[in-house]
C-alpha cells in the first residue's frame, strides 16, 4: 500500500494538515503503508507529540497496530527516546506496554539498550511491565543496558525490586560478563556492588568476566574484578587458559603486570 497524505503529514509533524485531513469523513487514519506503518506509527517515530495527541483523540484509531516488523508505535517511540509520545501512548487504553515485537523485544528493552533513561522510568512505572522479560536469546533489559555501557539505565534497573542483575542469556553471558567484555567500568562497579551477582560466573566456554577483561586489555575492569574476594585469578577456561594466559596472548602488558603483581597468581598456570 502507498503512503497516504495523512501518513506523510503525520510523519513530518504537520499538525494543521493532519487536523484538516481528520476533519474529512473519507480519510482512513489506520491505513497502513507498504511497511505496515500507520499515520500514528509514523508520528510516534518522529516524536511529534501534537500529531500523536490528535490521532489518539479519535475513537477509531488503533493505537497498538504493528508494522511489518511487529513494532508498535509505543515500541518505536521508546526506542527513539520520545518521552512525551511514550506518555501519551501509555495513557491511552488499548496499548500493551510490555508486548514483544518481531525481534522479541519489549518497549522497555528498546529504551534500555538505547540508553533512554526517562523512557525506562516511565515504563517501569507501569504495573504490567516485567523488567526481567527476555528476548529470544534470553537477554533482558539490564543485559542490553550493560552491553552498551548505559550506566544510568543500569542504575535505574538495579533500583527496581525484582530485577535479576545476574540473568544469563542463552550463551551463559551475564550483564557483568558483557560489561567486562566491553570495558564498561562504571557498569561493572555497579553490578559488583549487588548481592546475587557471581563475579566468577562461567560462560558456555568456561570463560569468566576477568578472563575476557584481561584478553581485551581493560585494566580498570581487571582491577575491579581482582578486588573481589571470590574471584579466582587462576581459574582456567575449558581449554585450560587462565586470565594471565589471555592477557599474555594478546600482549596486554598493563594487565599482565596487574596479574603478576598478585601473590596468588601462578605464572606457570595456563594452556601451552
Image (tube, rainbow, N blue to C red):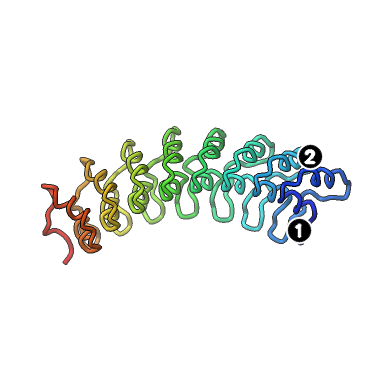
Q: Nearer the viewer, residue 106 or 119?
A: 119
Left-right relation of 89 to 2: left
Where residue 107 appears, as percent x and y from the top left, is 56, 45
The answer to whether 87 is drawn above or below residue 33 in the figure is above
Where residue 205 appears, as percent x and y from the top left, is 30, 59
Q: Which residue is depicted at the point 14% across and 52% down?
A: 260
Q: Farthest right residue?
A: 25
The answer to whether 130 is drawn above or below residue 147 in the figure is above
SS at mark 1? loop
Q: Return the mark for residue 47.
A: none
Q: Are marks 2 and 1 in contact (CB under 8 Å)?
A: no
Where residue 85 appears, as percent x and y from the top left, is 65, 40
Identify the residue position indicated by label 2 in the image. 59
Q: Which residue is depicted at the point 37% across and 43% down?
A: 187
Q: Nearer the viewer, residue 91 or 10?
A: 10
SS at mark 2? loop
Q: Which residue is depicted at the point 12% across and 54% down?
A: 266
Left-right relation of 170 to 12: left
Packing grade of label 2 (10 A; few <14, some 14-19, many >=20) is few
Q: Is the N terminus in the top left, top right, bottom left or bottom right quadrant?
A: bottom right
Marks 2/1: CA–CA distance: 22 Å
Where residue 52 appears, as percent x and y from the top left, is 71, 42
Identify the residue position indicated by label 1 in the image. 3
Amino acid at each position: 500500500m502507498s503512503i497516504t497524505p495523512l501518513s506523510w503529514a503525520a510523519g513530518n509533524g504537520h499538525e494543521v494538515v493532519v487536523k484538516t485531513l481528520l476533519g474529512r469523513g473519507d480519510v482512513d487514519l489506520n491505513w497502513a503503508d507498504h511497511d505496515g506503518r500507520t499515520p500514528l506509527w509514523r508520528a510516534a517515530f518522529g516524536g511529534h507529540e501534537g500529531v500523536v495527541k490528535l490521532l489518539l483523540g479519535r475513537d477509531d484509531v488503533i493505537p497498538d497496530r504493528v508494522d511489518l516488523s511487529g513494532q508498535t508505535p509505543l515500541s518505536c517511540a521508546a526506542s527513539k527516546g520520545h518521552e512525551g509520545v511514550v506518555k501519551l501512548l501509555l495513557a491511552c487504553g488499548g496499548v500493551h506496554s510490555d508486548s514483544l515485537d518481531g525481534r522479541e523485544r519489549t518497549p522497555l528493552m528498546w529504551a534500555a539498550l538505547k540508553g533512554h533513561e526517562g523512557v525506562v522510568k516511565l515504563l517501569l512505572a507501569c504495573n504490567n511491565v516485567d523488567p526481567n522479560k527476555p528476548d529470544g536469546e534470553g537477554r533482558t533489559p539490564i543485559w542490553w543496558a550493560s552491553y552498551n555501557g548505559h550506566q544510568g539505565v543500569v542504575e535505574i534497573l538495579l533500583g527496581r525490586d525484582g530485577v535479576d542483575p545476574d540473568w544469563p542469556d542463552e550463551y551463559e553471558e551475564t550483564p557483568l560478563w558483557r560489561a567486562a567484555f566491553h570495558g564498561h567500568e562504571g557498569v561493572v562497579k555497579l553490578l559488583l556492588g549487588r548481592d546475587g551477582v557471581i563475579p566468577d560466573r562461567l560462560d558456555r566456554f568456561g570463560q569468566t568476566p576477568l578472563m575476557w577483561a584481561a584478553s581485551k586489555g581493560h585494566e580498570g575492569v581487571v582491577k575491579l574484578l581482582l578486588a573481589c574476594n571470590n574471584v579466582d585469578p587462576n581459574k582456567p577456561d575449558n581449554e585450560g587458559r587462565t586470565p594471565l594466559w589471555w592477557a599474555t596472548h594478546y600482549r596486554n602488558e598493563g594487565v599482565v603486570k596487574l596479574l603478576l603483581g598478585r601473590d596468588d597468581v601462578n605464572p606457570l598456570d595456563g594452556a601451552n
